[in-house]
Image (cartoon, rainbow, N blue to C red):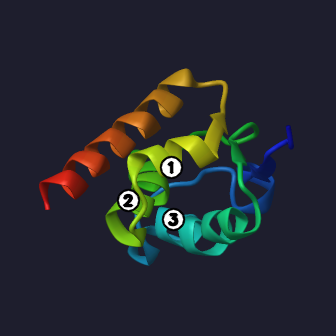
Amino acid sequence: MTLPHTIFVANEFGDMPHGRNDKDGIYNGLLFRKKHLIPALEKHQKVLIDFDGCKGCGSSFADESFAGLIDHEGWTKDQVIDRISYKYRFKSVIKNIYKYIDEAEERRLAK
């Protein structure tokens, strides 16, 4: 089994990821999804998102980054869950990411 490619968010993006898009600042979810997450997913079958070293993770960032794959990129919940895993000392952040993914899948299925 191949180890996942790891994105170290604090080092490669910013130590306080927050916001949905450029209106919310430079460490936003849209930018992370487009410039870091999608390119990693194009090159690697599995990607680990490592939030260690981050001071927090804004809900709109998490929603836009990961549920955004479903809302805006045509992915399904199963694809997101199969290909991306998360590491962070605050388990509530990871729990919320999965909640946002579930909500995005509900929106996708309702279309």
Q: Residue at x 45, y 39 (%)?
A: 97
Q: Secondary structure at mark 1?
A: helix
Under circle 3, the secondary element is loop
- Disc 2 to disc 1, C-alpha distance: 8 Å
Kind of residue indicated by mark 3: Asn
Q: In the image, is 12 to the left or to the right of 15?
A: right
Q: Nearer the viewer, residue 15 or 95?
A: 95
Decide: few, some or many residues near mark 2? Use Cα within 10 Å; few <14, some 14-19, many ≥20: many
Distance from label 1 to label 3 (Cα)? Answer: 19 Å
Q: From the image, which quarter does the C terminus lie in? A: bottom left
Q: Toward the viewer: 65 or 12?
A: 65
Q: Which residue carries the number 2 mark?
A: 70
Q: Amino acid at mark 2?
A: Ile
Query: Callout 3: 10 Å neighbours few (<14), some, many (20+)?
Result: many
Whether tag 2 and tag 3 are in contact, CB under 8 A, the answer is no
Residue hosting label 3: 28
Say how many tags the image has: 3
Q: Are marks 2 and 1 in contact (CB under 8 Å)?
A: yes
Residue under numbered circle 1: 80
